[in-house]
């Protein structure tokens, strides 16, 4: 009976923790994470007219969110050659067909895929980046395009939309 209670308690705790994390988070530097209840996520960032994005899976252990991108591929079809896969520049995979490599029209890009895995620390509705040494990034930063030197929080705040 004690084991059933313990297992039930752990499951309830994990489900509550997941629901607490689910949502959209933004920082002051043009980056956002969207964590969905089905354990998928989307990452979007932009810096100086360049965009980066990824989609993948996430999980939580204690107060740390671990996420890993799942690459998205376009199919490249060249006449007389085997189809091949290339890393997609858009969030929706496409078929790119041509008679030769020279004829390939590269689709307009919504950015480059940022295919990586990493982790974030969750506390009080905020996400913190974690340094390689395990410490949280909490020191305010200046935006590179600001000449007034104003500093901004480096963490991600949950957005209520």
Image (cartoon, rainbow, N blue to C red):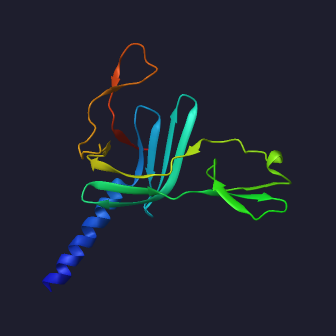
* Residue 142 image offset from top left, x and y in percent: 36, 23
Q: Is residue 28 left or right of residue 8?
A: right
Q: Nearer the viewer, residue 23 or 105?
A: 105
Q: Is residue 27 left or right of residue 51?
A: left
Q: For the point 27% across and 72% down, which residue is it?
A: 11
* Residue 97 image offset from top left, x and y in percent: 80, 55
Q: Check the image and report above or below for 144 versus 96.
A: above
Name the residue furthest left.
2
Work out which quarter of the rendered image holds the N terminus and state it: bottom left
* Residue 24 image offset from top left, x and y in percent: 43, 47
Splitting the image into 4 quarters, where does residue 117 fall? bottom left
Q: Is residue 95 left or right of residue 152?
A: right
Q: Check the image and report above or below for 32 versus 15.
A: above
Splitting the image into 4 quarters, where does residue 149 fall? top left
Q: For the point 35% across and 18% down, which residue is it?
A: 150
Q: Nearer the viewer, residue 73 or 10?
A: 73
Q: Check the image and report above or below for 144 versus 45.
A: above
* Residue 132 image offset from top left, x and y in percent: 29, 45
Q: For the point 28% across and 66% down, which residue is it?
A: 14
Q: Count the labels in the image.
A: 0
Work out which quarter of the rendered image holds the C terminus and state it: top left
Q: For the point 42% across and 13% down, which residue is it?
A: 147
Q: Is residue 95 left or right of residue 158?
A: right
Name the residue furthest bottom.
1
Q: Nearer the viewer, residue 161 or 33?
A: 33
Splitting the image into 4 quarters, where does residue 76 fall? bottom right
Q: Nearer the viewer, residue 25 or 92?
A: 92
């Amino acid at each position: 009976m004690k084991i059933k209670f313990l297992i039930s308690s752990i499951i309830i705790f994990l489900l509550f923790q997941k629901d607490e994390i689910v949502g959209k988070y933004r920082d002051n530097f043009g980056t956002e994470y969207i964590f969905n209840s089905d354990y998928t996520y989307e990452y979007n960032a932009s810096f100086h007219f360049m965009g980066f994005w990824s989609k993948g899976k996430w999980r939580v252990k204690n107060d740390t969110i671990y996420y890993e991108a799942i690459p998205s591929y376009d199919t490249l079809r060249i006449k007389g050659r085997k189809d091949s896969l290339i890393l997609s520049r858009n969030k929706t995979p496409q078929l790119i067909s041509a008679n030769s490599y020279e004829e390939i029209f590269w689709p307009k890009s919504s950015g480059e895929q940022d295919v990586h895995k990493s982790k974030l620390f969750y506390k009080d509705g905020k996400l913190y980046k974690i340094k390689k040494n395990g410490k949280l990034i909490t020191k305010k930063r200046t935006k590179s395009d600001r000449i007034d030197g104003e500093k901004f929080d480096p963490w991600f705040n949950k957005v209520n939309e």
